[in-house]
Amino acid sequence: MFEGHDTTAVAITWALFLLGSNPEHQEKVHEELEEVFGNSDAPITVKDLPQLKYLDRVIKETLRLFPSVPVITRLLTEDVKLGDHTLPKGISVALPILLVHRNPKVWPDPIKFDPDRFLPENSKLRNPYAYVPFSAGPRNCIGQKFAQLEEKIVLSAILRKWRVKSVKTFDTIKYGYTIILRPQEEVFLHFTPKQ
C-alpha cells in the first residue's frame, strides 16, 4: 500500500523542488509563515493551518504539475457516449491526470509554476474536473484532506527554518512513473538557515 506515505513524501519533494526553483514564490511562503508565526518556535497547530493560504496554493499547484498518481483507470459499468463514439460497458478507460493538468486550453502557460492559478477568482470558472490530483466523484481518494494537511505541516516546519535552492531546473529534471509520478534521479536541494 503506497497511499499516504510514498505519495505524500513525493509531493513534498516536488513542492520543495518547485519552491527552490522559484525563489519569488518561496519568498511569499516565508512572508506568510512570518505573518502567522512571527519568531515563535511553537509547533504548528490545527488553528494555524487555515491561515496558510499561499502555502495551500503552492501545494495545489505542485499537485497540478506533478500529480502523485498521474494516471487513473476506471472500469465502465455502462455504455458511455463520448461525442460521436460509444465506449462499451466492461472496458477500462484511463484518465491521464498529468495531461489534464497540463492542458493549455485550461491552464495558460501550463508548465509555469503559478500558485495564483488557485486564487478563488482564478478558479471559479474552471471546470472542477480540470484539476483532479486525488481523482473525483465517489471513487476519489479518501485521504486527500489528510495528505494536504500533512504536506502543509511538513512544508511549514521546513520552511520556517530553512530556505531551499534547487540544483536542477524544471526543464532539466527527469521524472517518470509506474504508479506514482516521481523523480528518476535524486532531487538535490541546498538548505540555508533562515536569518
Image (cartoon, rainbow, N blue to C red):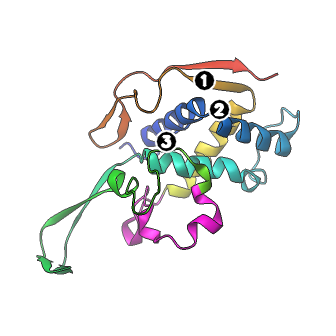
Q: Which residue is mark 3?
A: 8
Could you say whether the residue bearing mark 1 is in a helix, strand or loop? strand
Callout in the foreground (1, 2)? 2
3 or 1: tag closer to the N-terminus: 3
Q: Which numbered disc, 3 or 1, marks the residue closer to the eye?
A: 1
Quarter holding the C terminus is: top right
Q: Position of residue 52 (x, y in %)?
A: 73, 50
**Helix, strand, or loop for circle 3?**
helix
Question: From mark 1 to mark 2, how far is it between C-alphas?
Answer: 8 Å
Report the residue marked by disc 1.
Answer: 165
Res. 44 in view: yes
> Where does the image place residue 43, in percent across and percent down from the top left?
78, 38
Q: Is residue 122 magenta?
A: yes
> Residue 161, percent across and down?
74, 27
Please tell me whether residue 75 is drawn above or below residue 39 in the rendered image: below
Residue appearing at x 37%, y 23% in the figure: 185
Tell me if residue 106 comes above or below residue 34 in the rendering. Answer: below
Q: Earlier in the sequence, mark 2 or mark 3?
A: 3
Q: Quadrant of the N terminus?
A: top left
Secondary structure, mark 2, is helix
Left or right? Give the position of 54 relative to 171.
right
The span shown in magenta is 117-142
Query: Residue 102 versus residue 52: which sits nearer the camera?
Result: 102
Cα distance in 3D space between marks 3 and 1: 20 Å
Mark 1 or mark 2: name the one nearer the start of the chain: 2
**10 Å crowding of disc 1: few (<14), some (14-19), many (20+):** many
Three-letter residue code for mark 2: Pro
- Circles 1 and 2: CB atoms closer than 8 Å: yes
Disc 3 residue type (three-letter): Thr
| Residue hosting label 2 | 23
Q: Quadrant of residue 132?
A: bottom left
